């Protein structure tokens, strides 16, 4: 197990470098003069331009700039954006909102996804099951931005059920964005739970559990559920990293000041350092989460062994 | 049962085979039979055919020019003259929705082909040659897989210069490249594991012992085995790419007006949804039905091919 | 008997007043499936006394396992439904009991073990946890105590180094050891009746004998009634007191084990006996039963066995269902021509 974790951690290093270099190269290949518009309508004074170019190492070749960027990164310095603002505090301000949003989305996936999935698996072909099937299909068919726009219109604007935007970052305001962010995965979580549990309920060991004289609650709640939830737990676990990276659209629609919003604005304003830093963090979160999920898998399914 | 063939003798505890008189059928034949009888498949197939017709020959459905807009018609609701009503600019929504199919289908189909080619070739190389090839391909795939799909596509699209705004294919191919670039790793992984499985099979060892060349082994043994999982993945991914194109256009980095795309129309409709919800409704429905048709079809193919389910 | 079993609360000696421990009477079970109505059990009757071993013999699909599941009350409903008959356990028709009381019987008074121990044991719990669950659920024992009892049970079924292995998972055991775990779990509460559904089919031949010996020994010690379900005549020869042969959801012959082997009174039994390879008949062809077992949704008219029967005459075999005729004490045959079969008048 220890060796497996070590090997996975070592594999992460080239991936992290590769991903940051790729993004770094692309954002600094963004078209246009990075100095354009910095000094109003006039071209910038030569002295300012030189200082600016030196500060951002604009005259170095790309790989050199990347290495210099990494050097600063290793010192915990994410650098400044083009207007001279340090990037770290911007990310520190934005990150909690995205983590909160993604955590709420995951909570919805666990609560609603597993709850509804179990209910439909136990009562297959019932009215609830059919209704849930239709809803999950709609959620899968709707791209997240459509779900967001439509829900915002009905719940937020027409019926005033929930706040239409999230200016104050309260839990109440985040309910709708979190649901929208979770919607696609939620639909899959319900389907996976239902399929998996329905399959497990036909398993021989469930028959054994009944032959042991256990009541239905224990047969389903302990013997079937523990097995049936294995694929859902790994699915939802892996989803956290995906949701953090996928929050761009949701944060945009509901005006959440998270990293998605930050990075989308940074791309538009050609803030290469900001974009690279945010992507680096997102990639890291994604990689660590995938490792944790694989380890979790071995914990909840004793048949899995990593060597 | 009364005229049992006396030569047909069976061991004591056979698995009862219903209809054992039938000719044994292969898995793919079984799957095909299943699919032909599945109403969901038939509906999805019909929707997809209709969409292809819209994309190729929009003239079959409408003669109204989607670019011919009359501001005096702005935000008018559905009527006998314009079935879906008019949008903010007074353009005919029905016509725009029909013409919008082309961008979605083009991006979906081309991205799927791109992903299948790149992912397929690299996955097969990694699986077949192993060693350093496998390491390189797998790590590179990891890099592209670890970058959030949408974020990566947005960065690619803002990096490459926007060319002629009136060209249809230039922005479409930009979106296709962006989606392919961050979509291929999943398919490479599928292809790699299929190749690994097939490579270990006895019949491949036998073929190699008989002197079959590597290209021949790949073509004759590996590819046919990979077809099924790739078809399933590609069908579902096509739906996803259609959704991704709309998302990117909605964000303003995919196709740009005057190009016609459901994503662009949804984006412009969002601003006026309070007063004119019908402007939002039609592109949303078309987009969702398209995405769903491909995903459900892929799902059904997977169920039909999975022997565990039968 | 080990120290652990003497204080088991559920252990009761059944007074040998001749009353059977379990009586199945005219049991009917059907499965309502999309393909149609499958009549899996069509009027099965048999009984087991305390300390007795009844072997139920038949091909897959003959209804032998379904009967057992109906007795235990673990039939999958739907699609399976008990549509008639009675199952009397210690004189009481348990089909009429409320589910809660029936559940209390399961595991405690009647237990069952299954063919494939790997799939029948829960893969995500340790064997100690699964054996101990019997004590925790039925006797309210604590976790710690139940684990100690689980180790005792594992010792009793002779699993080596039980103390170390109690925390292992099913997949870490060999096939024979897994079946021993199943057995330990089923006899944990000293049930009066044990149903073993093909307990050795999935095992190697040498291991089969060990497991059968263990079952016989446990039965001798505890005096429980044992129903041994199998398709393998060889398995039951040494251990069964009586044998009931099933075909297409009916009992076609019942007899004391010795009588059945010596003089079968049903063509199906006779054919089964003929299909066992014998050392003394080396070089001869093994007799086989021609044709296929019947499809339960489309049972043949009259005697279900007639399409495969050497003794078949269109009248009455294709028209009348032969009743199970009792022609001696403890002997019965459901064949119109049982006398001819018994006499060996070969045709």
Image (spheres, coloured by chain):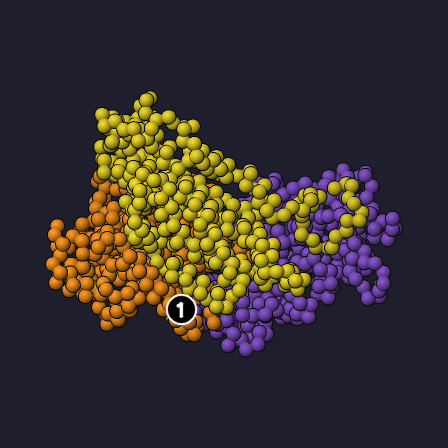
Chain colours: A orange, B yellow, C purple
Q: Relative to C154, is C270 on the left or the right?
A: right
Where is residue B212? Give x, y as percent: 64, 60
Q: Nearer the viewer, residue B170 or B94?
A: B170
* Figure quadrant of residue A3: bottom left
Q: Quadrant of residue A69?
A: bottom left
Image height of A292 relative to B285, above or below? below
In the image: residue C88, left or right of residue B11: left
The residue at the point 37 percent across, 42 percent down is: B169
Q: Residue C140: x percent and y percent? A: 44, 65
Which residue: 31% across, 60% down? A25
Label 1 neighbour load within 10 Å: few <14, some 14-19, many 20+: some
- The answer to whether residue A267 is seen in the rendering is yes
> In the picture shown, does residue B92 fall above or below A170?
above
Which of A170/C322 is in front? Answer: A170
**Image quadrant for the N terminus of chain B?**
top right
- Which of the two residues, B168 or A133, is positioned nearer the viewer here? B168
B77 with respect to B173 (left or right): left
User: Could you say where residue C43 lies in the image, as x and y percent from the top left?
Assistant: 66, 46
Whole-percent x and y of residue B218?
57, 57
- Total number of numbered discs in the rendering: 1
Residue C85 appears anywhere in the view: no
Label 1 chain ID = A
Residue at (58% x, 54% y) in the render: B219
Camera-nearest residue between B95 and C104 = B95
Q: Which residue bears the numbered disc 1?
A: A11
Q: Is residue B95 above or below residue C229?
A: above
Which secondary structure, mark 1? helix
Residue at point 31%, 45% (across, down): B163
| Extreme residue in the top direction | B80
């Amino acid at each position: 197990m220890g060796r497996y974790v070590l090997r996975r951690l070592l594999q992460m290093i080239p991936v992290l470098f590769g991903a940051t270099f790729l993004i770094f190269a692309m954002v600094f290949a963004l078209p246009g003069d990075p100095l354009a518009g910095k000094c109003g309508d006039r071209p910038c004074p030569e002295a300012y331009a030189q200082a600016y170019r030196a500060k951002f190492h604009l005259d170095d070749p790309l790989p050199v700039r990347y290495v210099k960027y990494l050097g600063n990164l290793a010192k915990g310095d994410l650098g400044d954006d083009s207007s001279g603002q340090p990037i770290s505090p911007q990310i520190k301000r934005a990150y909690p909102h995205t983590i909160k949003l993604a955590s709420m989305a995951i909570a919805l996936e666990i609560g609603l996804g597993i709850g509804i999935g179990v209910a439909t698996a136990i009562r297959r072909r019932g009215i609830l099951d059919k209704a849930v099937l239709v809803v999950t299909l709609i959620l899968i068919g709707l791209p997240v931005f459509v779900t967001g726009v439509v829900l915002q219109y009905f719940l937020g604007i027409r019926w005033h059920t929930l706040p239409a935007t999230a200016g104050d970052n309260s839990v109440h305001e985040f309910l709708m964005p979190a649901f929208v962010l979770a919607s696609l995965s939620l639909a899959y979580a319900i389907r996976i739970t239902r399929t998996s549990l329905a399959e497990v309920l036909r398993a021989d060991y469930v028959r054994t559990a009944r032959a042991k004289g256990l009541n239905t609650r224990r047969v389903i709640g302990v013997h079937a559920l523990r097995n049936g939830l294995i694929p859902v737990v790994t699915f939802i676990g892996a989803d956290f990293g995906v949701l953090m990276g996928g929050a761009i659209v949701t944060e945009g629609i509901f005006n959440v000041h998270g990293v998605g919003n930050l990075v989308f604005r940074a791309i538009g304003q050609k803030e290469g350092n900001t974009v690279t830093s945010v992507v680096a963090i997102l990639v890291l979160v994604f990689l660590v989460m995938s490792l944790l999920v694989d380890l979790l898998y071995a914990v909840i399914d004793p048949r899995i062994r990593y060597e | 049962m009364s005229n049992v063939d006396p030569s047909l003798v069976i061991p004591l505890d056979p698995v009862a085979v219903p209809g054992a008189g039938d000719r044994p059928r292969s898995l793919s034949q079984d799957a095909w039979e299943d699919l032909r009888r599945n109403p969901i498949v038939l509906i999805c197939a019909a929707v997809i055919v209709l969409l292809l017709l819209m994309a190729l020959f929009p003239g079959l459905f409408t003669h109204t020019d989607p670019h011919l807009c009359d501001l005096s018609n702005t935000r008018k609701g559905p009527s006998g003259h314009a079935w879906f009503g008019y949008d903010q600019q007074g353009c005919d929504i029905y016509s725009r929705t029909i013409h919008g199919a082309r961008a979605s289908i083009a991006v979906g189909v081309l991205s799927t082909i791109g992903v299948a080619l790149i992912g397929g070739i690299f996955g097969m190389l990694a699986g077949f040659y192993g060693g350093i090839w496998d390491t390189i391909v797998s790590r590179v795939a990891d890099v592209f897989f670890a970058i959030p799909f949408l974020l990566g596509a947005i960065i690619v699209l803002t990096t490459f210069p926007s060319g002629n705004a009136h060209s249809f294919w230039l922005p479409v191919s930009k979106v296709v490249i962006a989606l392919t670039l961050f979509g291929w790793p999943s398919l490479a992984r599928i292809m790699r594991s299929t190749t690994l499985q097939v490579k270990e099979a006895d019949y491949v060892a036998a073929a190699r012992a008989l002197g079959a060349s590597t290209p021949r082994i790949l073509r004759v043994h590996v590819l046919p085995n990979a077809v099924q999982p790739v078809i399933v993945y590609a069908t579902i991914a096509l739906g996803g790419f259609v959704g991704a194109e709309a998302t990117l256009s909605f964000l303003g980095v995919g196709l740009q007006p005057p190009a016609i795309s459901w994503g662009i129309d949804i984006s412009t409709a969002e601003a006026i949804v309070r007063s004119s919800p019908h402007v939002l409704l039609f592109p949303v429905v078309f987009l969702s039905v398209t995405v769903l048709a491909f995903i459900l079809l892929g799902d059904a193919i997977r169920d039909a091919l999975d022997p565990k389910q039968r | 008997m080990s120290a652990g079993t003497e204080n088991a609360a559920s252990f009761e000696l059944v007074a040998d007043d001749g009353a059977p421990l379990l009586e199945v009477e005219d049991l009917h079970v059907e499965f309502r499936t999309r393909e149609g109505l499958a009549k899996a059990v069509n009027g099965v009757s048999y009984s087991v006394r305390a300390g007795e071993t009844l072997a139920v013999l038949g091909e897959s699909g003959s209804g032998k396992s379904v009967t057992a599941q109906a007795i235990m009350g673990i039939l999958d409903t739907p699609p399976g439904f008990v549509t008639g008959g009675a199952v009397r356990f210690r004189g009481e028709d348990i089909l009429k009991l409320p589910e809660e009381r029936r559940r209390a019987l399961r595991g405690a008074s009647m237990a069952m073990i299954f063919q494939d121990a790997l799939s029948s044991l829960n893969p995500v719990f340790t064997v100690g946890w699964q054996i101990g669950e019997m004590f925790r659920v039925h006797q309210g024992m604590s976790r710690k105590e139940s684990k100690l009892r689980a180790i005792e049970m594992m010792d009793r079924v002779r699993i080596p180094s039980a103390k170390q292995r109690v925390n292992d998972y099913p997949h870490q055991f060999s096939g024979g050891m897994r079946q021993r775990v199943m057995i330990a779990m089923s006899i944990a509460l000293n049930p009066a009746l044990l149903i073993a559904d093909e307990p050795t089919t999935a095992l190697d031949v040498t291991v089969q004998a060990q497991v059968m010996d263990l079952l016989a020994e446990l039965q001798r010690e505890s005096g429980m009634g044992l129903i041994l379900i199998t398709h393998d005549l060889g398995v039951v020869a040494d251990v069964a007191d009586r044998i009931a042969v099933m075909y297409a959801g009916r009992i076609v012959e019942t007899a004391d084990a010795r009588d059945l082997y010596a003089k079968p009174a049903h063509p199906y039994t006779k054919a089964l006996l003929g299909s066992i390879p014998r050392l003394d008949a080396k070089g001869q062809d093994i007799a086989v039963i021609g044709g296929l077992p019947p499809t339960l949704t489309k049972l043949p008219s009259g005697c279900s066995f007639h399409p495969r029967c050497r003794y078949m005459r269109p009248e009455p075999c294709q028209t009348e269902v032969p009743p199970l005729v009792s022609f001696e004490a403890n002997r019965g045959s459901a064949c119109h021509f049982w006398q001819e079969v018994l006499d060996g008048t070969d045709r």
